[in-house]
Image (tube, helix red, strand yellow):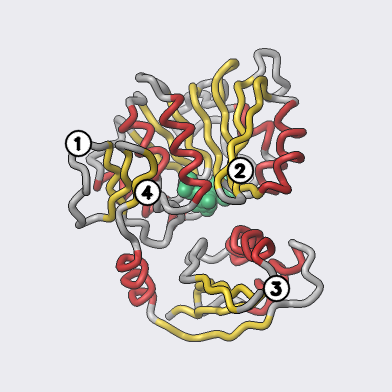
Amino acid sequence: MLLSCFARICSQKLFYVLVRVLPVWMKTTMKTLMLSTGAINSDVSISCIFDDCKDVDKCISLAANSIGLNERPRYKVIKGDPLDWINNTKESFNPVEVAEGLWVVPEGRTPPDLQATNIILNPGFAFGTGEHPTTKLCLLLLCSLVKGGELFLDYGTGSGILAIAAIKFGAAFSVGLDVDPQAIRSAQQNASLNNLGADKLRLHLVPSKRCPTTFGNGETETQKYDVVIANILYYPLLELADHIVSYAKPGAAVGVSGIISEQVQYIVLQYSKLLDGISVTKMDDWALVSGTRKRNSVAS
Ligand SMILES: C[S@@+](CC[C@H](N)C(=O)[O-])C[C@H]1O[C@@H](n2cnc3c(N)ncnc32)[C@H](O)[C@@H]1O
């Protein structure tokens, strides 16, 4: 049983921030779910799904506080079946052309262009269908960086979309990390859908504060990867900057996304200490900051 919570908040900008913040606070296994959005006059409503054991009131209050809302948004709770949500999502998920020759195609659908790079996905409860601007920005960066044979780290893998895409672009190996067991399960399923075994793609459930420096085989993971991308959230991107960059080889490419325009300056400030050649790309109101790891960077 799930609780759907429809909360109405006052502005589009806050909506974007809240949508990204809520799942962190929910700490639920059913997180990162947004059923639908609808603007009514200047109001915007969002829908989130919670396990029925969760304290919805507390989650919404924490999320509202964390983005500086003075009042808790009004909301109503509807009980529902998780399968309804999954089926609704499947029905609304159509093939997405991210760039010419790059499609994200729902499981069971015929790719519109059989010659294209087609990433087959069943998002399940995880984020990353290729429709969101942050995912698109990351995919476009990845496509431009992967020339063949790279090691890629996907920090916050969600559905596994970036880790899978990297291999399809020619990377030798991808590692996907996530704090959410649902995301890891979903990414595993998607790796299979794309015929990628453990020789190509590995997934690890990690703690939220600091990912380990080895992933179980004793091999050191820091300074190992040719490309590192983290599409997570503004605050973890700030807090974990050293840590995220530490996985990249000196001189390797690092991209961070999941931020809105107003947050770019703070992310640039933080990552300028660690990266050279910082650049910012934007799509709608979302941004991606990228650069190459400084050769003498402080990250270990
Ligand atoms: C916005 S989704 C991105 C999914 C996919 N990489 C994409 O680009 O569409 C962010 C994912 O990062 C995970 N995440 C959030 N904080 C994290 C952290 N500190 N360490 C690892 N993963 C994290 C979330 O559980 C979620 O699955």
- Residue in the picture at 49% in, 65% down: 33
For disc 2, the marked residue is 287
Judge whether residue 202 can be spotted in this image. Answer: yes
Task: Specify the amino acid type for callout 4.
Answer: Ala
Q: Nearer the viewer, mark 4 or mark 2?
A: 2
Rendered position, 127 above or below 53: above
Residue 10's disc number: 3
- Residue 242 in the image: x percent, y percent? 68, 31
Rendered position, 257 above or below 246: below
Q: Nearer the viewer, mark 4 or mark 1?
A: 1
Instruction: Measure the alpha-carbon separation of dots 1 and 3.
Output: 45 Å
Instruction: Measure the alpha-carbon separation of dots 2 and 1.
Output: 30 Å
Residue 115's disc number: 1
**Do residues under tags 2 and 1 come within 8 Å of each other at their CB atoms?**
no
Task: Specify the amino acid type for callout 1.
Answer: Gln
Q: Residue furthest front?
A: 41
Rendered position, 107 above or below 101: below
- Residue in the picture at 66% in, 79% down: 57
**Do residues under tags 4 and 1 come within 8 Å of each other at their CB atoms?**
no
Query: Which mark is first along the chain, 1 or 2?
Result: 1
Residue 28 picture quarter: bottom right
Query: Which mark is first along the chain, 3 or 1?
Result: 3
Query: Which mark is first along the chain, 2 or 4?
Result: 4
Task: Specify the amino acid type for callout 3.
Answer: Cys
Along the line of sight, the residue nearer the viewer: 124 or 268: 268
